[in-house]
Amino acid sequence: MNAAASDAVEPRALEGRVVLVVGAHGGLGEAASRACARAGARLVLLGRRVPKLNRLHDAIAGEGGESTLYPLDLEGASPDDYAEMSARIGGEFGRLDGVLHCAANFRGLTPLALTDPADFARAVHVNLTARWWLTQACLPLLQESEDAALVFALDAQAPGTRAYWGGYGLAQAGQAALVDMLQAELGPNSSVRVSGLNPGPMRTPLRANAFVAEHDDAAVDPSRVAAHCVELLSPAGAAHRGRVWSPP
């Protein structure tokens, strides 16, 4: 964990909060889920691989945390599926105080002219459209909270103008725009804060699709980024309302 980040956040900064982690069993998703649980959050762990969700649930329980599993594949889920998910969270917990978007889809670097149409559509959908559908379904529940946070993990290594990143790169640019647009529409006094997190290069399976791991000295373990996710989900995240944060 990054020492400077951990010093900026109270040890139980998420006490009493219910947080939905989307893509919970991925590299950043898993590290952030465990950090959020240690910070006191009750977690809803969303992902498509049930065995991995179960292992994460057991690890969180072993550290004294509380989590509920919600298996769902973002690629095939519909707006109705997200509406049902939001209703179930509201019914079980009576509240939702945060959503952390970590789920991502990236098949590798490919020239646009050679990109498989299905791969392009999948990347845009999972990395942008599905994130918004889920967010839209959760907004009414989040707006019932006195202080709620929507956090989008972005990948600044893949801006929409950079060659070979295809639908994944375009989706990153779209998400950055979404942070600005949604916060502007909600207004500065909304109880829902919207922010993006540019964590920098992380040593994850997704990044390995673009960079050779043993030569990727710039990448860090996701556990070093997890505290930044906690900060954005906590009251301290108000300092980053409406913008994409790139921690030092």
Image (cartoon, rainbow, N blue to C red):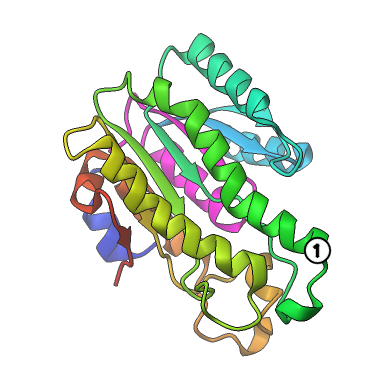
Evaluate whether residue 227 shows in this view.
no
Q: Quadrant of residue 158?
A: bottom right
What stretch of residues is rendered in magenta? Answer: 12-40
Quadrant in the rendering for residue 163: bottom right
User: Which residue: 52% across, 68% down?
Assistant: 221
Give the total number of marks visible in the rendering.
Answer: 1
The percent coordinates of residue 34 (x first, y second) are 50, 44
Residue sitting at x 53%, y 86%: 217
Residue 241, compared with residue 51, is above or below; it is below
The C terminus lies in quadrant: bottom left
Q: Relative to 140, does residue 125 appear above or below in the rendering?
A: below
Image point (37%, 51%), residue name:
179
Residue 21 seen by the camera: yes
Q: Secondary structure at mark 1?
A: helix
Q: Which amino acid does the dot numbered 1 rest on?
A: Pro
Side of 115 relative to 132 (left or right): right
In terms of depth relative to the viewer, which is nearer, 213 or 157?
157
Using the image, determine if residue 148 lies above or below residue 178. above
Q: Looking at the image, which is closer to me, 30 or 163? A: 163
Residue occupying the point 52% across, 9% down: 91
Residue 42 coordinates in the image, percent (x, y): 45, 27
69 vs 224, left or right, is right
Q: Quadrant of the N terminus?
A: bottom left
Residue 38 within the magenta-colored segment of the rendering: yes
Provide the residue designation for mark 1: 117
